[in-house]
């Protein structure tokens, strides 16, 4: 693999295949896999990711908003696409692009049925979202009779799945709460199924649910962060391969004498001789200001170089006093070894935030070993 000559995000499809197969190995035969490709495929490239997953046999996709699903349809994706958080303003587009909404409230259910009716639709695939303890969006258990009543009055919809979302499946100290969530969802789903007269797909598990709660795999599981190489736990991270690697180069090297300052607001003042390297990536590319002032680091020639001063819009400066390096040398912001979880943890955040923050202006380079 050639060295970076500019700021790039490498997307390794062989790693994506590995992660997909690893997660699939945790499931019983027949359990479907829904791949979450929202937020530009967790900061990579949703179209590239979806096309590859479609090729290797994914059952479903999920996006957050209708606009994300439209991008996939226009790119030629045929696999069913679940829209996790649709807004009524997008319902017409959802129908036009044959996306499948997760209906999570009386308002969304009522308005989507009305939109279907005005479009002369019948048996349109929808998903019903239940709140089992995350308390974010979703119908509650007491709403089952209301849902049943609304569905009994129309032939416009067909309930493809019932879903919920685990709140703390990666936290072993919250096992009791998670089991309660699983049981709440099972009870609620069984109640609605009795009145529907047919059994939709059930799904509740996220990546950590797949790995830690096999009793919650039901008919389908949803995986987002796991597909991209992160298992929210060291023993699982070791089995997964980060799909994205963010790299850059050293633009220039400076030498600071004691008392000299660096960057905006003179946030770093050298207390001794300091050699710094300037790198063409900044908060407009996804490296937020929280990584500045030695909270974040990059890797140069296998050594950590800590970010000095404030992160600029288009640049960071790092300490290379003890690193043998030259202008033009490659810089690793994160990759398979120095992964996004390690970089994010030092700055008090999580891999999800670092990955999804990578700006569209960062060039994407797809690595496909096939």
Image (tube, rainbow, N blue to C red):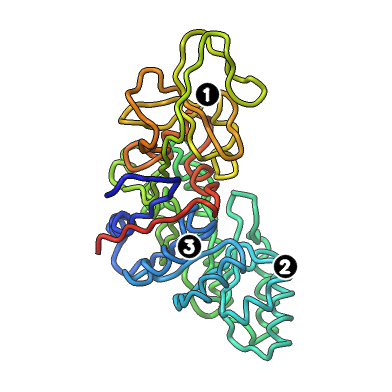
Query: Residue 78 at x, y = what percent?
Result: 45, 78
Residue wearing tag 2: 106
Question: Badge 1: how crowded within 10 Å, few (<14), some, or many (20+)?
Answer: many
Q: Earlier in the sequence, mark 1 or mark 2?
A: 2
Residue drawn 71% across the image and 86% down it: 117
Residue wearing tag 3: 46
| Label 2: which secondary element | helix
Give the answer, above or below, for where 336 lies relative to 62: above
Residue wearing tag 1: 308
The extreme left residue here reads 370
Q: Which quadrant holds the C terminus?
A: bottom left
Query: Residue 293 at x, y = what percent?
Result: 55, 23
Query: Residue 174 at x, y = what percent?
Result: 49, 38
| Label 1: which secondary element | strand
Q: Earlier in the sequence, mark 2 or mark 3?
A: 3
Residue drawn 48% across the image and 62% down it: 46
Disc 2 to disc 3, how far (Cα)?
Answer: 31 Å
- Closer to the camera in the image, 343 or 166: 343
- Closer to the camera in the image, 28 or 343: 343
Give the answer, above or below, for where 115 lies relative to 182: below
- Closer to the camera in the image, 324 or 207: 324
Number of the front mark, 3 or 1:
1
Question: Badge 3: how crowded within 10 Å, few (<14), some, or many (20+)?
Answer: many
- Closer to the camera in the image, 365 or 113: 365
């Amino acid at each position: 693999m050639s060295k970076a000559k500019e700021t790039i995000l490498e997307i390794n499809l062989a790693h994506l295949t590995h992660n997909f197969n690893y997660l699939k190995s945790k499931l019983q035969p027949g359990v479907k896999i829904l791949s979450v490709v929202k937020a530009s495929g967790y900061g990579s490239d949703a179209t590239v990711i979806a096309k590859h997953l479609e090729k290797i046999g994914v059952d479903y996709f999920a996006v957050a908003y209708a606009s994300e699903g439209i991008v996939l349809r226009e790119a030629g994706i045929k696999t069913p696409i679940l829209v996790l958080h649709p807004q009524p303003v997008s319902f017409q587009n959802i129908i036009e692009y044959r996306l499948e909404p997760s209906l999570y409230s009386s308002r969304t259910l009522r308005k989507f049925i009305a939109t279907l009716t005005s479009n002369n639709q019948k048996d349109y695939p929808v998903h019903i979202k239940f709140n089992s303890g995350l308390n974010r969006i979703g119908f509650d258990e007491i709403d089952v009779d209301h849902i049943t009543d609304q569905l009994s009055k129309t032939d416009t919809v067909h309930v493809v799945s019932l879903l919920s979302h685990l709140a703390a499946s990666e936290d072993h100290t919250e096992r009791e709460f998670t089991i309660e969530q699983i049981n709440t969802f099972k009870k609620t789903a069984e109640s609605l199924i009795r009145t529907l007269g047919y059994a939709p797909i059930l799904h509740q598990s996220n990546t950590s649910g797949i790995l830690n709660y096999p009793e919650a795999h039901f008919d389908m599981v949803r995986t987002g962060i796991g597909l991209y190489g992160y298992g929210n736990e060291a023993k699982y991270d070791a089995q997964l391969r980060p799909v994205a690697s963010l790299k850059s180069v050293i633009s220039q090297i400076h030498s600071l004498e004691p008392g000299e300052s660096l960057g905006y607001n003179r946030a770093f003042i050298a207390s001794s001789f300091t050699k710094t390297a300037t790198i063409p990536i900044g908060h407009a590319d996804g490296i937020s200001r929280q990584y500045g002032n030695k909270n974040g680091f990059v890797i140069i020639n296998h050594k950590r170089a800590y970010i000095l001063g404030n992160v600029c819009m288009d640049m960071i400066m790092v300490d290379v006093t003890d690193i043998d390096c030259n202008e033009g040398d490659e810089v690793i912001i994160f990759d398979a070894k120095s992964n996004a979880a390690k970089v994010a943890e030092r700055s008090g955040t999580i891999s999800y935030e670092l990955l999804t923050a990578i700006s569209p202006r960062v060039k994407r380079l797809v690595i496909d070993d096939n």
